Amino acid sequence: TLHEFGHAIGLLHEHSSPISGINWDKEKLYKEYAKMGWTRDDVDQQVFYTYNKSYTNGTKYDNKSIMHYPIMPGETVDNYVIDWNLVLSPGDIDIIKALYPMKGKRKNEVVRVNMQNFGGIVMQGNEKKGGISLFPSFDLKTGGKGGPVKMVFKFYDEEGYGFQDEDGAYQENGTVATLRTVTLPPNKQIKYNQGGKKDFEFFLPLDQIPADALSQNMIVTFKIVYQTAEKEQKNLYVSQPLQFRYAKK
């Protein structure tokens, strides 16, 4: 509960600290998380990803933080182990004080979002349009300051390997993707594709996906990304992987 509370108030995963020095057994964890439907990219982003050093605000790596995932025996190559942390550490308290000062404004305010009422994703194949239309259904509560974010769908084969982009037209970091850039206002509640409406569409041409993959199961993920002033991509929201099969319509 404390860990999720930490997310709610903007704390970052401590295992993602760029100064943690954790030596993950990556291939082993790719296989373990695949059993739960995670793609390799999901594992990279949620487990192995490390954020920019500027995000540490000068703090040290804190293996007692409530935001540190437990590390089980065998998950690292050097048998580094972390148990569940159930009490706020001194480092947690210092960060919370910086984020929520009793007096004055918060330093380095950024775009903040809270995903609510996520109703899934409607995906429709359309021969006439020559592609796949995607309609994610959710409410977005914004905070902090207004600004642009990217909303991104990425596509993978049934084994969790990203379809490799070949023409640069629809991609993110070399993986086939379709995205929209949206400027969010501060402190608003915004509805997307709610109540049966289809008012916010993403589209991917079929020629971006290998022809043989269209007859197999595929995986898609959805995320919301904010780019910091230092050009770092910060994930504000990442969905669970969703499996689907292309159906003509």
Image (tube, helix red, strand yellow):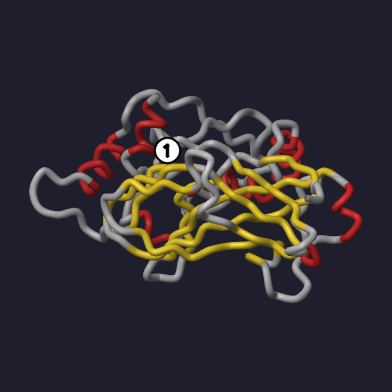
Which residue lies most toward the right here? Answer: 212
82 relative to 37 in the view: left or right: left
Quadrant including the N terminus:
top left
Residue 119 location (% of width, % of height)? 53, 36
121 relative to 164 in the view: left or right: left
Task: Name the residue carrying label 1.
Answer: 116
**Residue 132, quarter of picture:** bottom right
Q: Nearer the viewer, residue 151 or 203?
A: 203
Residue 18 location (% of width, % of height)? 48, 55
What residue is shown at x 58% (from left), y 38% (from top)? 120
For mark 1, give the secondary structure. Answer: strand
Q: Residues within 10 Å of mark 1 (few under 14, many from 20)?
A: some
Q: Nearer the viewer, residue 71 or 219?
A: 219
**Residue 105, quarter of picture:** bottom left
In the displayed structure, would residue 42 be above or below residue 119? Answer: below
130 relative to 139 in the view: left or right: right
What residue is shown at x 26% (from left), y 60% (from top)? 108
Residue 30 location (% of width, % of height)? 73, 42
Residue 54 location (% of width, % of height)? 37, 61
What's under tag 1, amino acid-wise?
Gln
163 relative to 181 in the view: left or right: right
What residue is shown at x 68% (from left), y 32% (from top)? 74
In the displayed structure, would residue 1 be above or below residue 151? Answer: above
- How many dots with numbers? 1
Q: Nearer the viewer, residue 199 or 66?
A: 199
